[in-house]
Image (cartoon, rainbow, N blue to C red):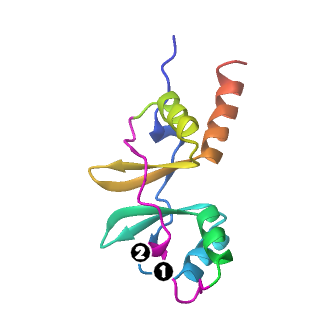
Amino acid sequence: MKTIPTMSKYMTTTPHSVGFDQTLRTASELMKTHGIRHLPVMKAGQLVGILSDRDLKLALSLRGVDAEVTTVDEIASDDVVLVKPEAKLDEVSRTMAEKRIGSVLIVDNHHLVGIFTATDALKALNELLHTRLA
């Protein structure tokens, strides 16, 4: 029986991140430039939250929110799911489905080393379907 792969095989390494004190405009431009929907939020080198494109779009639609003034820490979520690179793909994907979240952050020794998104999960599924079930 084949073993279930770990996050280290399918995670996106060295994810783009944003500083907690950066503006929503900066975060939006980062997402657009890199074609991503999730940004880990950092403060003094430490992970403090995550910002999704959905949260960003919602905030920008609210009256009184100025993308040039409002900072990431005002809307980022601190409810982040963290897993280790050794975490098994099935466990992480089940957690993501149960919690209805689009990403988890991969940490090793308290350092952000990767991100695993729904897009990464679909790539993993495709690879597994073509290699293990073919």
Residue at image location 50% in from the left, 70% down from the top: 75
Most foreground residue, 80 or 88: 80
Question: Is 14 a magenta residue?
Answer: no
- Residue drawn at the location 26% of the way across and 50% of the way down: 109
Tell me which corner region of the image, top left, top right, bottom left or bottom right, holds residue 48. Answer: bottom left
Q: Position of residue 64 (x, y in %)?
A: 60, 86
Q: Quadrant of residue 73?
A: bottom left
Judge whether 38 appears above or below 116 on screen. below
Residue 85, horizontal then vertical, whole percent: 40, 41
How far apart are the alpha carbons under marks 2 and 1? 7 Å
Q: Report the disc number at residue 30.
A: none
Check the image and report above or below for 100 versus 53. Answer: above
| Residue beneath disc 2 | 20
Give the labeled residue for mark 1. 71
Q: Is 77 included in the stretch rendered in magenta?
A: yes
Looking at the rendered structure, the kind of residue marked 1 is: Thr
Q: Residues within 10 Å of mark 1 (few under 14, many from 20)?
A: many
SS at badge 1? loop
SS label for mark 2: loop
Q: Look at 53% across and 40% down and name the residue there.
A: 99
Mark toward the start of the polypeptide (2 vs 1):
2
Image coordinates for residue 32, horizontal then vertical, percent: 67, 71
Tell me: 63 left or right of 92. right
Rendered position, 11 above or below 6: below
Marks 2,1: beta carbons within 8 A: yes
> Identity of the amino acid at label 2?
Phe
Residue projecting furthest to the left: 109
> Residue 26 versus residue 113: which sits nearer the camera?
26
Q: Which residues are magenta?
A: 64-86
